[in-house]
Image (spheres, helix red, strand yellow):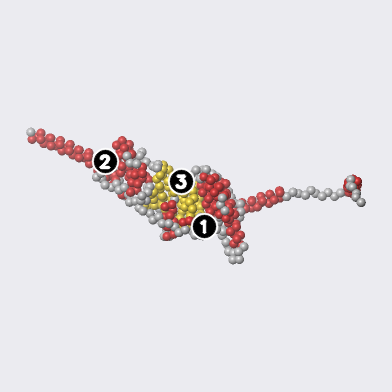
Amino acid sequence: MKSILIGLLIVATILVGGALFAISFPYYHYNQIVNLNAKSSWYYLGRYQKEFVTGHSAREENYEELKNPESWQKFHFGDLLIPLPDPSKNPYYTVVPNFSFSEKSGHTQFSLGITNVNGKVYNKIVPLPYGPFPDYLTDQKLFDLPIVRNAILEKDSDKVWKDLFTKDISAWDIQLKEMFYNLYLLNFRSRFILPQSTDFYLIKDSLKAVMKVRSEDNDFDAEIVFEKRGSRLFTYMLQTRRNDNGATRVRNYLLNKIEFLESTPSLTDIIFREFKNLSYERQVAATGMIYLLSAWSHNPERVEVLKNAIYHLEKGGRAQWLKNRGSSNAERDYRAPNLIQLEPLYVFYFERYKQFYSVIDVPNLQLESNLMLQKNVEKANREAMKKELLEAQKTPEPPIRELSVEDEFKQLIQKTKKSSKTEKGKLRFD
């Protein structure tokens, strides 16, 4: 009897121990994965950081208004509506384009710099392509289990987006459904948050998030801004000059005011017509360039729009240079204000189309020697073509043939005959 009781006790102990192990195993394994980055064939993270576990609280942004907001205007570039200083109204800021063309991919990365009139850059806006909201449901074998997948799919995508930045998943004494969802968030963070990220957070009471990344330029801070809209994720990069209060105010203004609006090629002609309705003074200044580059951004294959931007900036730049030359206190090495917009356009056009495009000469360009050579060759070709055209338009006079004495006598007889006929046909009144 005693041996039977001992046997039953052993069996009961094993069963209870097994049950406790079965119950505690998921919690133990969850804690190992989340807090110690344990790996298995069912769940494996390529990247792990402690902040992937804790997340960050949502933050408020200081959306301060700028002075003279009426001198700023929204322009449609790609999928972004960007507030920019209108150089014809704003005496402090202007806008300078920047282009990076990849011959390998054929892709052009376009950005806008907000600068002072001397070209010092305070802020940069880099439009980035939008895409579908990712789900990463196929990353882990664990997510293939119906019970796990259902726990994940119960959450709507807006909640997933917010929790991605804010939820602390370090606690292990939670329900199994929450455990499965947290493991999904951990994998999402590992995949979505960039390796070069230094901070990330959700902006309070919004679906807008900011990811701070290491900047290649030590003078600037760099942030990638995301905004979820339905099943799509819109994004752009902001770069802000460090330790500059004015640049920080502009950054806050841009973060608050930039909106997302999908691009379509038909917008090119619509915005081009808006440009044509501008006054001549605005067409040939930086304002006109902003309109034309906005139009170009919706269909970059429309090279004639880019040519128009160069041509009108050249017209304005030449007029600025001539005005300085004619003034009583003319600057010797005067650089027309339009040159800070023209120079990057020249460089991009040459890189993209392998030729230097120019119609009007604007002195005191600052380009690399190979581009200056191309510019001078283009100028010489243009002048040669102009000379040929002028020569072709001249109508040559027929050569004067010297008459012999006999021919002169015949001409005289013909004139006399015509004169006699005329006299007979006249009526005489006395």
Horizontally, residue 290 falls left or right of residue 209, namely: right
Residue 47: x percent and y percent? 35, 46
Q: Marks 3 and 1, how far apart in space?
A: 25 Å
Residue 377 image position (x, y, % from top left): 62, 52
Measured as percent of width and height from the top left, residue 263 is found at: 48, 44
Q: What residue is shown at x 29% (from left), y 41% (from top)?
A: 180
Residue indicated by mark 1: 89
Question: At label 2, which amino acid type do we have?
Answer: Leu
Three-letter amino acid code of the residue under disc 3: Leu
Q: What kind of element bears circle 1?
A: loop
Rounded to the nearest angstrom, the CA distance separating label 3 from label 2 is 41 Å
Horizontal side of residue 20 vs 271, given as left or right? left
Q: Amino acid at mark 1?
A: Lys
Which quarter shows the N terminus?
A: top left
Residue ID for mark 2: 176
Res 52 label: none
Q: What residue do we see at 36% from left, 38% from top?
A: 138
Q: Toward which corner of the image does residue 229 lie, by quadrant?
A: top left
The dot on residue 261 is 3
Q: Are marks 2 and 1 in contact (CB under 8 Å)?
A: no
Residue depth check, mark 2 versus mark 1: number of the one nearer the observer: 1
Q: Would residue 63 be visible to someone looking at this image? A: yes
Residue count near mark 1 (Cα–Cα under 10 Å), binned few <14, some 14–19, many ≥20: some
**Dot 2, how many residues are within 10 Å of its Cα: few (below 14), some (14-19), or many (20+)?**
some
